[in-house]
Image (cartoon, helix red, strand yellow):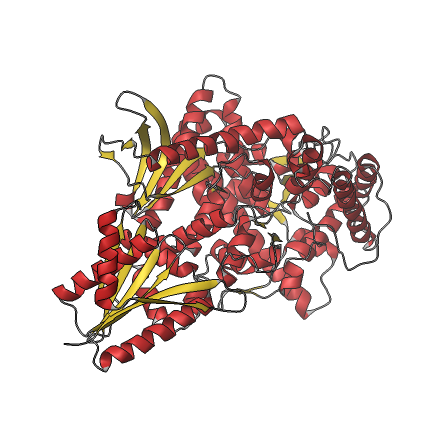
Amino acid sequence: MQNGDSDQPERPEPREIGEIFDDLRVLAQSDGAIHSISKLFYRDWVLAVDVHEGKILDDAEKRWSISKLNNNELMLLLGLTIQSDNDQTFSVLPKDDEFLTTADKLLREFHDRVIENARAKMDWSDPDFVKKDEPLGPLSQEAIYYGADGFYLHQFERLARHRYREDGEWLLGNIGVSIRPMLKIARFIVDKLTHQITATTHTAKETDEVGVGDLSNSLLIEKSSLIKKFGLKAEAFISKFSLPATGSNTDFLNPFDINQVNFSPLIDIGKFLYVSNQYRLLAAIYESPFYWMLNDKNYRDTAAKHRGDFLEDSAVQQFRSVFGKDNVFKNVTIRRNRKEIAGEADVLVTYGEFVIVVQAKSKRVTQEARAGNIDALKADFESAIQAPYRQAYEFSELIQGGAECELANGEVRTFPPTVRVFPLVLLSDQFPAITFLSNFMLERKVGIAPVIWDLGVLDTIVAILPTPIEFLFYLKSRADTFETIHSDSEFNILGYHLLQKLVLPADADWMMIDRDFAGTIDEFMVMRDMKVDAARPLGILERIAIPVISDLLKALKTAPPDLASVVIDLYDFSSAMLEELSNTILAIRGEVSEGKAFKSFSVLTDSGGLTYLVCNHVDGKIRVAAEAIGKKHKYDNKCDRWYVVIDSIETKLHIDALLPVLGKWEEDEELAAMSDRVGSMFGSRRHDFVVGENSKKTGQDQDSEEDE
C-alpha cells in the first residue's frame, strides 16, 4: 500500500469516510470549483515533453509523487461538482488557491482512513492474514482505488476499433454512431486540447498573464465545432459521453459508488464541453459500448461472443508479432485419451521447449468489488482469474504428461516430458491492482506460477520485449519470483527487470517494487501516445559489454527455437558469472591456439547444463567428441537437458555449431559406463569456484585432448 508522504510529520487520526466525503462535496460545489479542478489538472497531469528527443522533461519526483491526484481522486471531485444545482461552480472564478490546499488535505485524510481501515484488520503475527476474509476487503479497497492504470491512450484507440468492429450495425441503429466515428471525434478532441494546453503552458512560462480562467478555457471544446465537422454523429457522441454541469450524478453518494463521470467524462456547459480527463474519455469509448449492448436482451449474446472473439484474436495477433505465425495457435483442444477432450486453450504458443498456455477472459471488476465487498471480490476473482488459471495449469499438466493437443485444423501435437510450460491469464479489461491481489488471493499449484495481464499490459510488454528470447526470459523470471517480488503494477516489475533483472537481493526474502521503476516504460509508451518514434528501452543484458559473452548472447537471441532454452539459462546468469564465463572462454581459446585439438568446460544452469567447446576447426570428429562430452555431463549431473556450443578459432563467430542433448534423466548402466569412458578419454576434471560475493559455489568440469 502507498501510505502517504512518510517523510512528513505524523498526521492526526483520520475521520470516518462519510465525514470526509461530506466535506469534499461542500468543497467541490464551492464557487469556481471547475476552475480549481482545472488548476489541479495542470498541476498533476500535464507533462512537459521533448518530442524531438522523445523524452519526458518533468523530473521523476514530480511524475511519481504519491501526493499528486490519481484518476479516481480527480474524477471524485468532478463527480461531486456536477451534483450542484448552482452554476457558480463554473460561472465565477475562485478568489484564491484555498480549494487546492483543502482538496489535498481532505483526499490525503481519505487515503489515510482507507489505509487505517485496512491496518486495523492486519494481524502481523499471522503470516497468512492477508489470505483471510476479514482483512481482504479493506486491503483490496485500497489497492483497487489507488492502483496504477494498465492501458495507454493509443492502446484504447487501436483496441477499441477492433473490439467493436462487428457491432457497427447495432451501434448505428441504437446509438447513432459506430466505433470508428467515435474514435475520430475523440481524437479530434484530444488533438485540439493538446494544442490548447501546449499554447497555454507556453504562455504561462513566457508571461504572468495566464489566470485560472485561462486554464479552464484551454480544456473547453465548442460543441458547434464538433457538429460542423461530424454532423449527427457528433450529437450522438455528445449524448452518450457527456453530463450536464449541474444537477447530475446524484446517485454518487460515497467514494465507492458508481461515479458517472468515469463513463461520461465530458461536462456540458452550454455551448461548450469541459474535458479535464482525456484518459477517461478514451477509456469510456473502450469500455462503455459493451454495457450499452448488454441492455438489449436480443443482442446480449451476440455482443458477448464478439467480445470474446476480439480478445482471442487480439491475443493471437500480439503473440504472433513476437513468436511468428507458425508458433501461435487459437482454440487448441487437449485429450485425456482418444475419446475424452480434457480442455481447451484459447491460445497456445510453442517455441522450442517452451509452451505458453493462454486462457483469455472478458471480465471486469464490478463496482461492489471495487468498494471492498468481499463476496463480490471473490466472485469476480474466481470468474476472471482463478477459474481460467485452473484451466491453464490443468492444460499444462496434461501437456507435460504427453497428452495430445489438437489444433483447429485437425493437426495433432505432442510435447516431450522436458517441455517448459507457462500458464497465462489474459483479460480484455483492466482489473485494478490484479498484480498485487493475485499474490494473496490466487490458489495455485506448487511450481506453476501464472502470469496475469490485461491486453494493455500484453501490448506494452510486446513493444518492450519484441523477441521470443526476451519475452520468454521475462515469463520465466516472473514465475521464479511470483511469491517474493510484489508490486501494484506489472509495469513496475517490468521496469525493474530491465534495470537489473528480476533477482531478489541476497539479504532479502521478499521485495515490494515501487512505481518509480516504471519510469522508462511510461516514457516510451507516452511517446507512443504522442506518435513520437522513441527508442525502445534496453534490458541490462543488452546494455552490458562482456568480451565473447555479449556477441554470444546476440547471436543466440536469433537462434532456432530448439535452442531457446540454453539462451534463457545464460540470461539467468549473474553479471559476475557471465564475466567468469568470458574469462574462461578467452583462456581456453588461448590454449587451443597454442596447440590443443580442443578444450571444453561445462557448467550447470537453472534447467540443465552447458558445455562450451573450443577447437581449431569443426569436423565430424569434433562433433562426435562434443556430443559425447555433453551426454557425459548430462548423465553425471542427472539433468533432463544439456547443450553444447562448438566454437572454432578459425572463424570470427563464437557459435559454429550448437548441439542439444535432451531427454528425461533415468539411471542407466550403459550411460554410466559411457560417462566413465569419456571422462578417461578426455581427462575430465572438476573444480569449484565462487562467483561474486553473494553467489553460491559453482561447479565447472573441463575436458580436453592434446593435438595428435
Give the answer, above or below, for where 443 lies relative to 607. Answer: above
Give the image location of residue 196, x and y in percent: 60, 56
Residue 271 image position (x, y, % from top left): 64, 41
In the figure, is residue 482 to the left or right of 582? right
Q: Nearer the viewer, residue 670 or 590?
A: 670
Q: Provide residue 432's location: percent of width, then percent of height.
A: 59, 40
Quadrant in which residue 138 is drawn: top right
Counting from the top left corner in percent of width and height, residue 586 is at 33, 76
Q: Is residue 368 left or right of residue 338?
A: right
- When asked about the image quadrant of residue 140, the answer is top right
Residue at (39% x, 56% y) in the render: 470
Q: In the orientation shown, which residue stands out farthest toward the top?
A: 298
Query: Looking at the image, which is closer to me, 565 or 35?
Result: 565
Can residue 597 be seen at all in this image of the molecule? yes
Position of 437 relative to 556 (above/below): above
Residue 501 vs residue 327, the one in the foreground = 501
Farthest residue toward the bottom? 594
Q: Residue at x 50, y 64 (%)?
A: 695
Image quarter hosting the C terminus: bottom left
Q: Quadrant of residue 172?
A: top left
In the rendered image, the residue lying farthest to the left is 620
Residue 535 in view, yes or no: no
Q: Is 674 on the left-hand or right-hand side of 636?
A: left
